Image (spheres, rainbow, N blue to C red):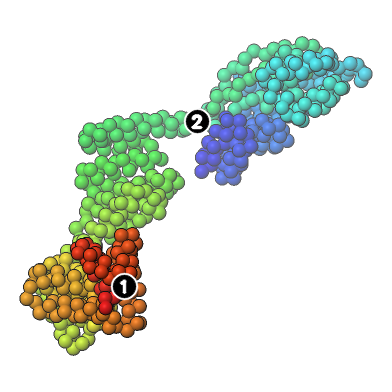
Amino acid sequence: MADEAKAKGNAAFSSGDYTTAIKHFSDAIALAPTNHVLYSNRSAAYASLQKYDDALNDAKKTVELKPDWSKGYSRLGAAHLGLTQYKDAIVAYKKGLDFDPNNEALKSGLADAESAAAASSSRSRAAPQSPNPFADSFAGPEMWAKLTADPSTRPYLQQPDFVKMMQEIQKNPNNLNLYLKDQRVMQALGALLNVKFRAPNGGEDMDIPETEGESPPPPPPEKKPTSANAPVEERSREPEPMDVSEEEREAKEKKAQALKEKELGNAAYKKKDFETAIAHYTKAIELYDEDISFITNRAAVYLEMGKYEECIKDCDKAVERGRELRSDYKMVARALTRKGSALVKMAKTSKDYEPAIETFQKALTEHRNPDTLKKLNEAEKAKKDLEQQEYFDPKLADESREKGNEYFKEQKYPDAIKHYTEAIKRNPKDHRAYSNRAACYTKLGAMPEGLKDAEKCIELDPAFAKGYTRKGAIQFFMKEYEKALETYQEGLKHDPQNQELLDGIRRCVDQMNKASRGDISPEELKERQAKAMHDPEVQNILSDPVMRQVLQDIQENPNAAQEHMKNPMVMNKIQKLVNAGIIQVR
C-alpha cells in the first residue's frame, strides 16, 4: 500500500500538483515510516512550494535514516539554500560528495551555495548608502514592458501580490532583498537582466529507490554572474529522470509482456482456437497477477469449451483477487456473471438453478448490468418451469381432484380448494380441476377468483360445456346479465342441448326484460345503471353524436323510433342500453 501511495505522489509531483504529492507521500510515510526515499520525495515537494522549513526537516530525516545516500544531502543542501543558510548548504553538499564524488547534482548545488555565500558577503560589506546595482533594471515603464514580453513572467502580472512587490521594489530597489525568497521575483529579476535563475530546491525530481552510486545525467553548463555584487545567476534545470528500482522496472516489463499475451489470447479466441487462447492467458497470469481480466478471459474460454468446473474456479479466483486488489467493481461483476452462466449450463434440476440465481444477484449488487439482469430472469423462469415439470404427475393430480370432490360434497369448500390447487400443480393442463375450483370459489362468494378459473377451464378445453355454465353463473351472480347471456350462447355452440346452458339463457332474458319493463326496484335500477356506466361499450354508445340524436328522437317522437329500429346496428345499440337499464321500454 505504501508503494501505491508513493506512485500517486510521484504522479502528482510530475504534474506540478505539489500539495497533492505531499498528501500521498505523507500517507506512504504513515505506512512505511522507515523508508528514506519517501522523506526525500516529500522534502522536494515542500521545497517546490517554498516551504523550506518543512523541506529541511524531511531532508534531515532522510539523512538520519540513510546516512550514506548522496541524494539525501542534496535535499539537505537545497533546503538550507532556500533558507539562505549558505554555510550549512555548503557543508551538506560537501558531505554528499564524500559519498559520491562524481555526483553532478551535488557539485552544481555546492557551486550555487558558494556563489550565493560570496555574493551575500559582498553585499554585507558594501556601504549602507551605496546605490543598489539593480536600480536601473526596475526604473521606469521599461520594467513592466520587459515583464510583459517575457512569457515566463507574463502570467505573474495577473497576480496582485506579485504586482505589489514589484511596485515596492520600484519605489525602493533596496526592498529587493526582502523578496528574494519569492521565486517569482527571482525569475522577474532574471528576465530584467536577461538571465535565467534556478529554483533553490534544484528542480530535482522524485526519488524511487535507485542503485547506490548511480549518478544523474550532467546538467547544462552554468552561466557566470555579471558582477560580483549581483545575486547568484543560476541555470534552468529540467527535473531529473525518474529513478526506477530494478524491481519496479522488472514489474513494468512483465506487465507489458502480459498485455501482449492477452492480446494474442484475444486473437486466438476470436479464431475459436481455444487451446492457444488458454495458453496465452495462462502465460499472462503467470507474468502479472494484478489484472483480473486475464483470469476472466480464460474463464470465458473454458465456458465456450464446456469446461464449466474450470470456468467456475477461474471466476472464484478472479473475484477473490479482485477484492484484494480493489479492482473495478464492473470487473468483479463480470466474473460473477460468468460464473452464474457456467452454473446455469450445469443445471439439471430446479435446485441446481439456486446457486446460479444467487450468483447473478451478487453480480447485480456489484454492477447493475442489463445483460446480467436478463440472465437472472431467464434462470428464474427456467427454475420455475423445471419445478413444474418435476412436480407433474397426472395420477397424483387425479387423486387430489377426487379428494377435492369429496370435500365439496361435504361443503368443506376451503379444504376442497386446497386439493384442487394441488391437482392443478400436479397437472396444470387438467381443465376439470379449474372447473371444480371455480365452483368452490362461487360457493364462497369469491367471484373474481371463480371467474378466472372458469375462463382458464374454457381456454384449456373450449368444448367443455361445464366451463361455460361456471362462467355464466358467476356473471349472473355479478348481475352482468348481458355478459352471462353471451357466455351461455357461446356454450350452446359446443353443446346445443345442454339444459344448464338453456336454463341460464332463460334466467338472463327474464332479468333483462324486468329492467326494460321497469319491474325492478329503484335501488336495483340505480345499481345496474351505475355498473353499466363502467362498460366501455355503453360509454361509446352514449358519447356517439348519432346515437344521442336517435335517443332524443325516440323521446320526442315515438313514431321516429320505428324508423330507427329498422337499422340493425342502431337496434343492437338500443337493446344494449335497454339491457343495461339505461332506457326503459313501456
At label 1, counting other C-alpha atoms closer than 10 Å, the crowd grade (few under 14, some 14-19, many 20 or more) is many
Q: Position of residue 180 (x, y in %)?
A: 78, 25
Front position in the image: 542 or 286: 542
Q: Position of residue 522 (x, y in %)?
A: 34, 82
Farthest residue, direction bottom: 410
The part of the image, by quadrant, that contains residue 476 is bottom left
Q: Residue at x 70, y 37 (%)?
A: 54
Compared with 443, 25 (above or below) is above
Q: Residue at x 89, y 16 (%)?
A: 131
Q: Residue at x 61, y 38 (%)?
A: 20
Q: Earlier in the sequence, mark 2 or mark 1?
A: 2
Q: Position of residue 42 (x, y in %)?
A: 63, 36
Q: Is residue 256 left or right of residue 388?
A: right
The residue under label 1 is which amino acid type? Ile
Q: Residue at x 14, y 66 (%)?
A: 460
Q: Quadrant of the C terminus?
A: bottom left
Secondary structure at numbered mark 1: loop
Q: Looking at the image, can residue 153 be seen?
A: yes
Label 2, on which residue?
245
Secondary structure at numbered mark 2: loop
Compared with 205, 313 (above or below) is below
Number of marks present in the image shown: 2
The residue under label 2 is which amino acid type? Ser
Label 1, on which residue?
582
Front position in the image: 281 or 100: 281
